[in-house]
Image (cartoon, helix red, strand yellow):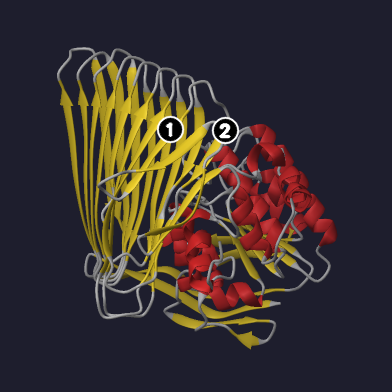
Amino acid sequence: MLELKNISFSVSADDADKDIIRDVSLVIPDGKLYVITGPNGGGKSTLAKLIAGIEQPSGGQIFFNGQDITEMSITDRARLGIGFAFQQPVRFKGIRVMDLIRLAAGRELNVSDACKYLSQVGLCANDYINREVNSSLSGGELKRIEIATVLARNSMLTLFDEPEAGIDLWSFNNLIDVFRNQREEISERSILIISHQERILDIADEIIVLKDGLVDKRGTKEEILPGLIGTTYAVPNCKGIG
Amino acid sequence: MKLNEIQKYLLKEIADLTDVPQGAYNIRSNSQSIGRQSSPNVDIIPKEGVSGLDIFIKPNSKGEVVHIPVVMTESGLKEKVYNDFFIGDNADVEIVAGCGIDNCGAHDSQHDGIHRFYVGKNAHFSYTEKHFGSGSGEGKRILNPETEVYMEENSSAEMEMVQIKGVDDTTRTTLAELKEGASLVVRERLMTHGDQKAFSIYTVRLNGKNSNADIVSRGVARGDSFQKLDLKIVGNSECKGHTECDSIIMDNGKILAVPALEANDVDASLVHEAAIGKIAGEQLTKLMTLGLTEAEAEEQIINGFLR
């Protein structure tokens, strides 16, 4: 279970502090799939980075399974069981897809193990395991590999920051299946997805709308989603994927 | 031939050898040949008057492998060795060289290896050269390889030249001259640390029509080390040349990349790329989200980069 208590985050801009997250308190229980939506600049990605330890809050506390992790490093949080799929995956010179999946899994893997993760994101392992995670990969391929690494990580809590960004429609359909499968298998685990996509919102247990750094709305999919349809907070899958 | 533990360790590092190699070989240890074998298609003959070998690969021979590793374990040794490779027309050969110096003493140990390759028409060779230093002595481990490659019509070569670690001072000089249709690919990897200095100087002359060269040097300078990369391609005919210096700088390391292109023919097409920078923060962050510490993430990134 993840608990945010009175989390704030501000940045200095033009000699003034700008509040990105304002006193947000949230509980993400185990076994649930949560989706955070809201306007661009509303603080969604920042909130995910605060949970993963990539950013440090200016105020408040973060608890994971009852343990205060506010001061913990990215590494320690990862080891405790927090996974993070980046909106814009990183490229590496020389590091291969297999290396990245092996590092994510934290153990030696054979080709068929790696294949299991790559096939879930629609990639043929034989074509990819020895490819370098460099600029020879398209944005869509890179995004799918990013998601495969997070699947291999098998974290207690996995954060996906705009998983649909940069992928094609075919991959998007595949991605929905990945989340559906995860949704069925999570039991003790939880998933937090940042997304504007209606079809991703549609598989959520609960939806949180973050606006101007504040929780604007939260509730079950049935309570929240109808009010979002037709707004930029819930874009149909034929739009906004690019 | 019996090898002691340090010799075995060095041979494993530089040539991935755990035993006496198959095929033709010469193993040089502390300025002496401690094992040599020719094969039906490869003659290894010691030079007269100077240290070194003449190595003849017969025309049309295929799949030959030649190992010529050098190890030095006595502190204070200095040597200059001339190895000439005569690769016959249409031959195809793999050559594994490399030098490991273990210096536990107070005196500098130095190996200057001059390798000349005379590559016949339509011949092909691959070359791997790894340089490695170890030992706790104050004496330096110094390696100054000079490599010359003379390529006849339609010959081709891939050369992997690597300085793994532990080499205190090096000046690496590589000269290549290519005739019509010849093709050269070089992959250099350089890692320096402590207060090491490395100079790497390439001059590649594309003399023949449709000759081409692709020279990529990747370097990592850590600690207080210094690297100077001096890559020059000269296009003297209709040809294609590409050089790339790609470097990671860490701690107080310093890197100077000096690209040079010289086109003496209107149909010469030459490209140089150079980039120097520290490890990208987002790369570290990504690997840390997979549970690696910052130091572990750095090692993974560097090992991948220098692979």
Q: Quadrant of residue B195?
A: bottom left
Dot 2: element = loop
Q: Name the residue carrying label 2.
A: B40
Which is more N-terminal, label 1 or label 2? 2
- Is B229 or B74 nearer to us in this picture? B74
Q: Are marks 2 and 1 in contact (CB under 8 Å)?
A: no
Q: Quadrant of residue B71?
A: bottom left
B238 w.r.t. B129: above or below: above
The amino acid at mark 2 is: Pro
A115 w.r.t. B206: above or below: below
How packed is label 1: few (under 14 Cα within 10 Å), some, or many (20 or more)? some
Percent position (x, y) of residue B19? 60, 58
A4 w.r.t. B44: above or below: below
The C terminus of chain A is located in which quarter?
A: top right
Percent position (x, y) of residue B97? 43, 48
Q: Name the residue carrying label 1.
A: B56
Percent position (x, y) of residue A102? 65, 59
* Chain on which label 2 sits: B
Residue at (62%, 47%) from the top-left corner?
A145
Q: In screen coordinates, is B301 left or right of A123?
A: left
